[in-house]
Image: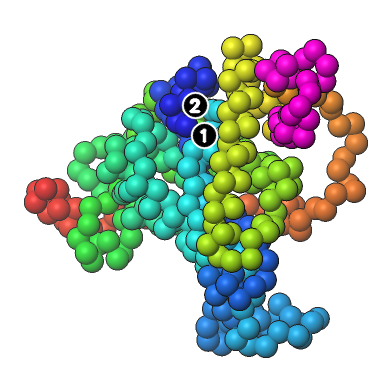
Amino acid sequence: MHLLMEQCGGKYWRIGEFLALAVDGSRVSVPRTKSNEAAFAAKNFGQGGKAKRRLKWKNKKRRTKKLGQPVKPQIWLTMIWHIGLQMPWCWRTGPSTSSERGHCQEMLQRQKFPENTLFCADAGFIGYELWKAIVDGRHHFLIRVGGNVHLLRKLGRVKVAQDIVYFWPREMQRQKQPPLMARLLSFQGARGPVHLLTSVLDPKRLSLTQARDLYKRRWGVELQFRTFKQTFGRGKLRSRTSDRALVELDWSLLGLWMIQLFAAKEQTPLAIPPEQSSAALAITIIRDLVRDKHRTIAGPKILSQRLREAVKDEYQRTKSKSARYRPPCIDQPTTSGPLIHIATRKLRQLYRSLATAA
């Protein structure tokens, strides 16, 4: 699949010198059966007094669930998504309590990624182990950071640029693990300042404008989940056993991936950007082919010609989306930026000792 993506990707295979991949996670519902509840459902929203308060708040209107009864069974899906071609790269599944960072680390260990791969993700993928695994694999990351991240400056003797910082959690200091050097980028977003941390230290390789554009295009992985759940009709799976549910999810993702790849193969030679490709139209065309397999589709038009025409229309909305549901958090300001500290003398000595030992 990756070889086919590279063959039909053309100039969209890489963005600059990087193979840009977005990472994100989402939940997929499955029927409430004993098998699915045992495999995928979370118990009690956790444990302890805080879990009881969350459960009480969750069921303050409908007190039908008892403490100990599993909540709605769901499969956690973590996907790595190709930003340039607008289609999946690989994915990992698990129970609803799974960690998307853990899934990402597993895919880094099992998958072989091309040289100069740049992983782009939101603030849910902050972690020393994950970032170190990316850097040790000779890849790069571009992650959004907030006020829960503590960074250091002036850690080494060598004078570095103003935007160079160090990520060195206290636990890693106690374990005498080396800090991670990164570059802090900041720009003004729609709802406030946005702060990104990248392992690409040279601004000539990844400028602020390029990083801002890449992070903006990362939103396409959210649209991929929406296409899979709503357009492709997999918001809730049908399998009533856990093993079959995982198989159904994998084959559904593979089917959507193949449809998008078929469309890209026909549209790329015509210089149609992947952002203009319509997955909904491509799905409709393939469904028509399956339903009417004994006759020609739409008269003289063949499948390849119809896939070339599966592009988004140029309709521009003239009124606001006031009728749609608007999340309450959409108007709230973004989180604060990372906390930056000046390295103490003790930390500088520890850093020099680790550098000497290495």
Q: Is residue 341 magenta?
A: no
Region rendered in magenta: 281-306
Counting every numbered tag in the picture gives: 2
- Residue occupying image coordinates x 63% and y 11%: 270
In the rendered image, is residue 39 in sight? yes
Q: Which mark is residue 82?
A: 1
Q: Are marks 1 and 2 in contact (CB under 8 Å)?
A: yes
- Residue occupying image coordinates x 74% and y 42%: 231
308 or 209: nearer the viewer? 308
**Image check: 154 left or right of 311?**
left
- Residue occupying image coordinates x 62% and y 31%: 260
Q: Position of residue 110 (x, y in %)?
A: 34, 47
Mark closer to the chain start, 1 or 2: 2
- Residue occupying image coordinates x 70% and y 20%: 303
* Amino acid at circle 2: Met
Q: Is residue 290 magenta?
A: yes
349 over 203 or under it: above or below? below
Give the labeled residue for mark 2. Answer: 5
In the rendered image, is residue 284 in sight? no
